[in-house]
Amino acid sequence: MASNSTVRVSSRAERQLLQSQINPLHGSFSSSSSSSNSGSSSRNGNSLQSYSNSNHPVRSKAPPPASRRSVTPTSSRSHSLDLENDHGRVRVAVRLRPRNAEELILDADFNDCVELLPELKRLKLKKNNWSSESYRFDEVFTETASQKRVYEVVAKPVVESVLSGYNGTIMAYGQTGTGKTHTVGKLGKDDASERGIMVRALEDVLASTVPDSDVVEVSYLQLYMESIQDLLAPEKINIPINEDARTGEVSVPGVSVVKVQDLDRFSELLQIGEANRYAANTKQNTESSRSHAILMVYVRRSLNQKAEDEIASQEKDVKSNLAGCNGIPRVRKSKLLIVDLAGSERLDKSGSEGHLLEEAKFINLSLTSLGKCINALAENSPHIPTRDSKLTRLLRDSFGGSARTSLIITIGPSGRHHAETTSTIMFGQRAMKIVNMVKLKEEFDYESLCRKLETQVDHLTAEIEREKKMRESEKRDLEKQLKQCQDSFSEAEKNLVTRSEFIQKENTRLELEVQGVISELESQKGCNDLMRDKVSQLETSLTYSQQHQLENSTYQKVLADTTQMYEKKISELIKQLENECARCERAEERLNLTKNLLGDYQKSIKQHESENSTYQKALADTTQMYEKKIAELNKLLDDEHSHFASTEEQLDLMKKLLSDSQKSIEQHEAENSVYQKALADTTQMYEKKIADLIKQVEDEHACLEGAEEQLSLANKLLSDQQESIQELKVIDELRTELQRTCQVHDSVQTELQSLKLEHKNLSREKATLSEEIHDLKQALVAEEKQRKSVEHELAKLKKSAPESDKDFEDKKPYGKENIGNGSSAFGNPMGLHKSNSSRAALSGQRATIAKICEEVGLGKILQLLTSEDSDVQIHAVKVIANLAAEDINQEKIVEEGGLDALLMLLKSSQNTTVLRVASGAIANLAMNELNQGLIMSKGGGQLLANTALKTDDPQTLRMVAGGLANLCGNERLHMMLKEDGGINALLGMARSGNNDVIAQVARGMANFAKCESRGIIQGHRKGRSLLIEDGVLEWLVANSNIASASTRRHVELALCHLAQNEDNVREFISCGGVRELVRISVESNREDIRNLAKKTLKMSPTFQAEGNPEWQ
């Protein structure tokens, strides 16, 4: 905390502005101390007892008068006036709680210890009927003060200053059960007028902010047993505190920060946080808060032009320095802390036992640290011990820092609590002396400007990337189109070249065909001219012969027949010759085509020698086709030969006929010489024609022979080509075989190298194993020596360890929520007054066990749990159980495998002592929520249930019931507990009749029912209770009026929580639970339980339908 206690105000105008805007209820505290916070974790029960003796004196002893007068404002009126005008001072208000029904009964012999003078803002604290002292506060609230008035006087000025840019703190302090949570954290769901400071403060903050430009965020945490936990995210525990080395600001970065825009959302968050906050039943309060709750509200407001004009007069100097930054927006960041402190309590009055005792220790220690800081600040001490507790570190800015702080202290009227009331009043008086150095936190909104610039940069970058992508896409499209055009152009060019070559070949072929046709036409023309001449000659001769027809009709008839016959023969010969010419022309064309195909095929073979395997089949098919064509040509030639033979025969026949004609002509020469001459000429002409025809046939034969030679040459070339192709194929096969051989050789070499490397590695491993075997031998020898030393230490442990089971069982009570009854010193209230010698002996035993554990090692002790010697095993498990009783040892025990070893003992051991002590150790481990899941996942719930079935020892049953009761306090494990038989085991143990066992069973049922009701309130659980299915309700109804007050209280609480579930109402009516609820609402010894029963009856519509006029 800062030692400086003066307010620094820059000018008179700023002081006037502060007076007009801020009510005198503000403040905060800070510290520059560097003392370690680890000291608080090393405190033990003795420090707690010393705190009780120092801060909570016995009623018969009055506090020292000197200290009381030193902080009483009545001693100096001028000092009071200075405090009134000091605007940075911590403002303190006091609120008196009205008497409750229990106090009306128990305090009949006591008068009220306080008297309020609200009009004078004073409080009188009565020592007795004739003596009292007066104290002045900033505000005094009577029992009838409304929640609204308390908020407007205490909290609203702080909220307004937070909205103006200052940090603020609102804190409630007082004895347990005096109404701190009611004043600060009341939700007011049923009655809006009952809302507390938290809800009203957030309502004003949200109403004064603009959602578009302002940001409101909240965090809700609790300080439970010096561990910071997130109430909005319960899985976050042990959250560290960070301090800025430059500014000294304290932050908790691991806590969830939720943005809030409406009051309904904040109410939901507040309800979730209250459900996750630790609370328990004590003699002074049914729902006693076991942790300090802190609500952090972060407000970030942007300054508009109008606000800047309003504060222009106070910020001229600042604006002159920032003349070049007019374009940068400004924001005001502020933080509001609303603190609901856990109530201080005296152990002899609260009746805290077991885990509640540990909670009370940490609560009182943190409040003691806070009181020390307040004292140091009030006395202007140079050293402020803020690091003694995490609470003082979190409130560093609230007292002596830069925040405006309002403190409301709550007290009760009962004279039985005169010492606690005195301590609370003195705390408030000392806090009034603290003056904070308030600061306005205003800065340029570089974040908003950066976000705006980043958004613009991202937008421009995205635009540039989009343009770039569009250009790249267009470029790719153009390149693709260009490539397509180039491909199409090259393909078209290639097609044109191929087409032009084909057309040229076609032109050449057609020119040759035209030339052949022209030559043939010319030859035919010559033949036709010759035949025409011959026909004309014949016609002339016939005309001449007709002149002599009359002379010799016989010769005319013979000549006509002969002429007709010759003309017919000649026409047939001409026709045959024409056919022969056409066939020869076709043969020549086929031969030329064959030559062209052979030439093209040879070229293609040369071009595709690398692909010879693919074209071999095509070559064979082509060769076969050519051979077939050659066979067809040979057949045509044979047909030509036969035709020529038939033609020769016909010529021979014609020669014979001519010879016969000559003979007949010679016979008639004498008769007509003219006819003989004409006949001789005709015969000579025909012979010449026949000779020409024979010559043409011989030429055709010569051409056919040349074609046969060319075909034989082509066949030879084809056979040579096939042989060369086969040779290439053989070469390719040999090359492939050579490559395969090379690959095999390479693989063999690689395998050989790998085998050598493997052999080398094996040799190294062999040497390493030899060394390890040697080291193991040496380690075994050392282990044997160490085992002997452990046995020696164990002998010492047997002498120093507790001799009775009761001594062990009373080391550490176990309980998730509150009570751990038993036959120990903590089992009854009088056990709190054990002698100092007993405490010293207990501390000495614990110190001895811790020293032995440190020297021997936890792992060695855990190994002794498996020893075959039962005495060794019993003493080892007792040591583990004593270690498990301390929270700091539990994590190490679980990590070293201690939990597994204990569960194995439950499973395998038949020794009653081992089972009892192991069950107690597991019950101690089950107090930690992290260990509960591990215990259930490893089958611990089922093992505890089985242990309860196989033993009748009351102490063992008490340990088992305590462990199951702790597990019942975790809602996530309920279904697993039911499946493993944990609920049935609790009911079975209740039948033992032992009061301690029944008390633990009732505590487990209360924990189970409370977790279920909490889940229903939070909305993540529905349906009938799991306890209803196992018959627990009947047992609770039957034992609701049991003699033991502690057990009866747990049974009554379990019934009230089960009745809050609407799905359980029918079973309540059928088994008589409603009658018990009505009885509890009237006859219960605890007012809070009576109120809870009445509230439950009124909330259920089914109970209303079954209504009873007494409780409606």
Image (tube, rainbow, N blue to C red):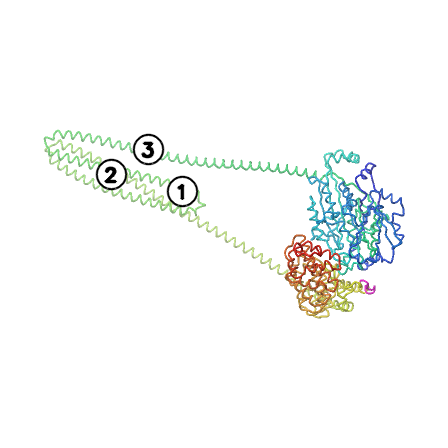
Q: Can you identify the residue that label 3 sits on?
A: 515
| Disc 3 secondary structure class | helix
Disc 3 residue type (three-letter) = Gln
- Expressed as whole percent of the image width and height from the top left, the position of residue 52 reads 82, 57
| Disc 2 secondary structure class | helix
Residue 1 visible in the current orientation: no
State left or right for residue 100 relative to residue 529. Answer: right
- Expressed as whole percent of the image width and height from the top left, the position of residue 768 reads 66, 61
Residue 734 visible in the current orientation: yes
Callout 3: 10 Å neighbours few (<14), some, many (20+)?
Answer: few
State left or right for residue 375 relative to residue 469. Answer: right
Say which of 565 and 671 sits in front: 565
Disc 1 residue type (three-letter) = Gln
**Which of label 2 and label 1 is nearer to you?**
2
Q: In the image, is residue 237 part of the stretch drawn in magenta?
A: no
Identify the residue at the far front of this view: 1109
Q: Sequence order check: which comes first, mark 2 or mark 1?
A: 2
Q: Sequence order check: which comes first, mark 3 or mark 1?
A: 3
Say which of 375 and 448 sits in front: 375
Q: Can you identify the residue that label 2 sits on?
A: 576
Task: Give the magenta part as a residue range.
Answer: 832-839
Disc 2 residue type (three-letter) = Gln
Say which of 133 and 583 sits in front: 133
Q: Can you identify the residue that label 1 sits on?
A: 602
